[in-house]
Amino acid sequence: MKQLIVAFLILGLSTHAQEANSFLEEVQAIQKKYDSLWDDTRETVVFTGSSSIRIWNNLSEIFPEQQIINSGFGGSQASDLLVNIDQLVLNFRPKKVFIYEGDNDLASGKKPRHILNTTEEIIHKIWVQNPNTEVVLIAAKPSLARWNLRRKYKKLNRKLKRLSDKTERIAYANVWDTMLQNKKVKEEIFVSDGLHMNSLGYDLWYDVIKEHMN
């Protein structure tokens, strides 16, 4: 029995290490980018999460009064953000953090409850550093490519909304509804892969996100 327990511990550590290393180069590139751009004397707002954040390239332009850090890393899941939370969020000592995770998690087969648990761990780590940091959870977005998973997406979003209702320090940015028309996804807001958004899609996101910026 003791050998079996040790084996599981080793396996867990190995899996954790793989998660930590799978985005190592991208995380290091983000750190290097902001080494010269980040002003540690100014309040900071961090946007982080998967590719829908990573390719939102004009965040600093549309929110010119804020110091924005975009630490999105493509293909990531909530567990990847948890592993890299120090480098991508905590090192910038943010006053507010916008998080977009859950999209890739659901596509990989993870259950909404599992994603929520990981999200709560992320928030806990943020609040250990500064309990006054505001966290904005961006709803998992609908898309043409993953419309078959919409029920799971809705379930996750309900859980994220309920989590945000527990405290004023967590907000829920409902981008789901604004991307629908007559209960179907707006096709014109996506690029050819049916998953990532074009500028029209990000215009819709901006209208939702700006309400949570101040």
Image (cartoon, grey):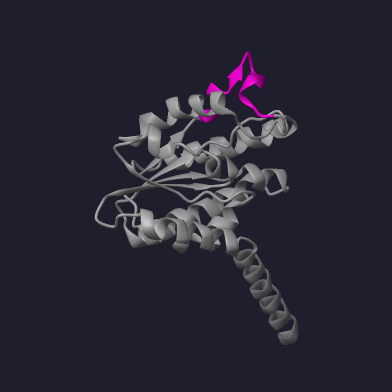
Q: Can residue 185 be seen in this view?
A: no
Position of residue 198 measured from the top left corner of the image (x, y, whole percent): 59, 29
Q: Is 144 colored magenta in this rendering?
A: no
Q: Quadrant of the N terminus?
A: bottom right
- Judged from this view, the residue extending furthest toward the bottom is 2
Placement of 158 over or under 125, stated as above or below? above
Placement of 137 over or under 41, stated as above or below? above
Q: Is 186 colored magenta in this rendering?
A: yes
Position of residue 165 measured from the top left corner of the image (x, y, whole percent): 41, 38
Q: Is residue 179 visible?
A: yes
- Judged from this view, the residue extending furthest toward the top is 182
The residue under the point 61% across, 60% down is 23
Q: In which quarter of the image is the C terminus?
A: top left
Position of residue 83 measured from the top left corner of the image (x, y, whole percent): 54, 63
The residue under the point 55% across, 55% down is 118
Position of residue 123 measured from the top left corner of the image (x, y, whole percent): 44, 53
- Judged from this view, the residue extending furthest toward the left is 41
Q: Give the range drawn in magenta.
A: 175-191
The residue under the point 52% across, 48% down is 72
- In the rendered picture of this protein, how many numbered marks are placed on residues? 0
The residue under the point 63% across, 42% down is 103
Report the front residue among 42 and 11: 42
Asked whether, in this view, residue 22 is left or right of residue 123, the answer is right
Residue 124's quadrant in the figure? bottom left
